[in-house]
Amino acid sequence: MSMTTTETDEVVKESTAPRTPSDQRERERLRRRAARRRGGGWWPYLFLAPWFVGLFGLTIYPMLDSLYLSFTDFDLLSPAKWVGADNYRRMFTDDPNFWDSVHATLVYVVVSVPLKLALALAVAMLLNRPLRGIGIYRAAFYLPSLLGGAVAIAIMWRQIFGGDGLFNDFLGWFGIKGQDWISSPDTSIYTLVLLAVWQFGTPMVIFLAGLKQLPKDVYEAAAIDGAGAMTRFSRITLPLLTPIVFFNVVLQIIDAFKSFTPAYVISNGTGGPLNSTMLYSLYLYKKGFTDLQMGYASALAWVLFLVIAGFTAVNFIAGRYWVHYDD
Amino acid sequence: MGHQISRRTLFRTASGMAAAAAIGGSLSACAGGTGAGTTSDKLTMTWWGSDDRHNAYKKALGTFQKSNSKIKIEERYSGYDGYFDKFNTQVAGGSAPDLLQMDTALVAQYARKGVIAPLDEYVGKSLDLTGFSKTLLAAGTVDGKLYGVPSGIGVNVLTANISGIKKLGLDEPDREWTWADLKAFAVKVNKASGGKMFGVDDGGGGTLQAFEVFAREKGQPFFSTDGTKLGFTSDTLQEWWEYWAEMRKDKASPGAAITSAAHNDLTKNGVVIGKTLLTFDSGVYGAGGAITDATLDFLPTPQGQWSGAREGNFVNGGVLLSATKASKHIADSVKIMSFFAQDKTAIKDMQLLRGIPPTEKARSIVSPDLSDTDKKSMDVADYISKRVGKATDALPAPAAPPKGADQIWDLLFQSNLAIAFGKKTIKAQLGQFFDQAQSILSQ
């Protein structure tokens, strides 16, 4: 009580003296904090409500539900039975198909992501110059990304790389007798990689936006100092672009891990031959919807979630050492 | 002056949020089901099949509605791919169809899980099954109760390209033939075509028309009667795979690449692309109309040439019609089943689109209008069912396959393919096959 009185006294006393700007700012800050504490009314939440409904109803709840299901034996048709960590144990110790799918997915991620990003960057640099009709070129290069997820493209891919497909016709011009690339367990995964690389449009557009932002004066200075094109690329473009590269790397890795449609369509839903195109998501789908092992499929989904989260965390940590921000 | 957002923060936040959204999608996309239930008073009927089958169903249902205008039917149809994936999701979401075309291979699973309804209380009343033989009804019977009305007789046959055989100057194999005859014939095809063609597609991974019959000829069923174990021995499977390894070596059968391409894709089947003259895949003629221009004929799966070989062929029930247990329209669904089983116009519309008609009466109704190939198909089915009926040493027709059966059939296919690609030896694959099969069956 006495404290408060003293304070008030001080304030009253001070009020006669000229206020310093710092006092005024302090007062303003306190008032704002108080307003914030009162919450500013309920109406902001009303505007956010549709998003919250979506977040809780369509994301958080299904996620928690699948976490629960991953500890059960659930066939969709009869009630889930609690089995503890049995699904996880089975996955790692008693399911060779699981390891086949892990292998196929890792090959897919490790090969397709770097190739796709390199191609995207190369094309972005080609398209980052004042050419007549450059907009048309950009659209043309972006097009595969728009079509890429489509079933029709995957079917076309199957035709192109099949035994009597377009690709072998092309090889035939040079007297090379090609094999059936889709139905050989040694090559089929690479047809999927090629399809992924072909859809370089999204990272390309992001690279292009990044390239447009790079300061021109640095290049001019470098050119005057006699730096060649390669030096300018490796010493200026790449370092300045690392935040964009990082963004693309993170997203493409996640996307590659989740890839489903091309593998499903190209292998006719089998993941074959010999599980060579059994991407993880496809295996998960087969377990859940074909073999009716929803509990097991949920466990697979959570392992995938943790693996992707792990990869992403490693990316963010490693990023500290190679990503340069221009603060 | 507000807080200055640095480039670093902006990028890190953006990357982080995009990453979180992308990762989260991997989970939520797979979980949950729709809560929508059946709200209308319509009876929903689903089936899979070819366009011909769709049209036949629709035509017959049109006739049915003329005399049953109170029953409103909603028809949903598709190909076989994804048909049961969708059905499972609908059952889980409470929006299952009332009446559906059911696969004989899956009826036991759905019956035991209580998804489909037993029909015994209707038999002889609103469900008229006059003329259906007991062996035929076994295809829809699970644990002594009837869960599905068979659409027709299904037998295991090889499909032969007759025009191709004649072009090479060869004779069509006799119906009474053995595995040794098949091999001799297939080698002749390769020689006569100058190495361009193979006699028969690789059956080493085939179950229904192939290995199951072979095992039965050895006196071993594919699954034990209670469905908890495999019914055949490792020796039997080894002999089978060795037979096919020799077939591939002698160019009687094509290599792994062709077998692999044709898996789940009829358009790449050896007979369709003109690489082989015989195929184990009944889909080439399948549900109405061939997908090849060649003249076709059908042969029973070969018999064993060893002493003591038993009759291995058997008769099953084509496809079934089943009603879901949660349906409010079971009585109406039963009326439709009965209509398809006995009504003259329905039988005429369906022809052989759901297998050889189940009763003597139905067969005599369709036979005048049949195409030549349809007639041959009916003839060989008749031939096989008579031979099986006369045989004294045949095992009983296989019981409805247990849960996980389709995984084991796929395992058989994949194992044979791994051997064909040279990725595994027969010995190594044998051990792995039995381990994995047992693990699947015990789940």
Image (cartoon, coloured by chain):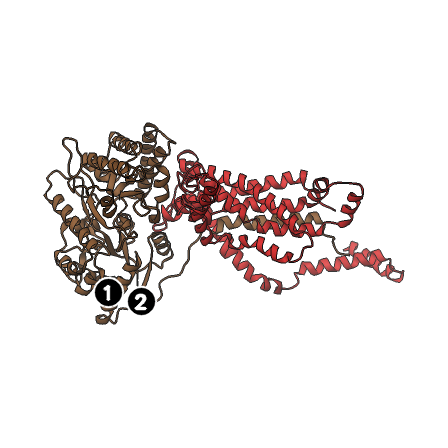
Chain colours: A red, B brown
| Label 1: element kind | helix
Residue B203 screen position, x and y as percent: 28, 39
Locate the N terminus of chain B by quadrant. bottom right
**Badge count:** 2
**Tag 1: Cα neighbours inside 10 Å, few (<14), some, or many (≥20)?**
many
Direction from residue B326 to residue A236 in the image, left or right: right
Question: Could you tell me if residue A88 is visible in this image?
Answer: no
Question: Could you tell me if residue B152 is visible in this image?
Answer: yes
Q: Amino acid at mark 2?
A: Lys
| Label 2: element kind | loop
Direction from residue B68 to residue A303 in the image, left or right: right
Q: Nearer the viewer, residue A258 or A5?
A: A258
Locate the C terminus of chain B by quadrant. top left
Q: What residue is drawn where x is 18% and y is 49%?
A: B138
Q: Nearer the viewer, residue B66 or A25?
A: B66
Q: Is residue B255 above or below residue B38?
A: above
Q: What residue is drawn where x is 56% and y is 51%?
A: B21
Residue A138 screen position, x and y as percent: 61, 55
Q: Amino acid at mark 1?
A: Ala
- Pointer 2 chain: B
Q: Is residue B424 above or below residue A228?
A: above
Residue annotated with mark 1: B60
Residue annotated with mark 2: B42
Q: What residue is drawn where x is 77% and y is 46%?
A: A218
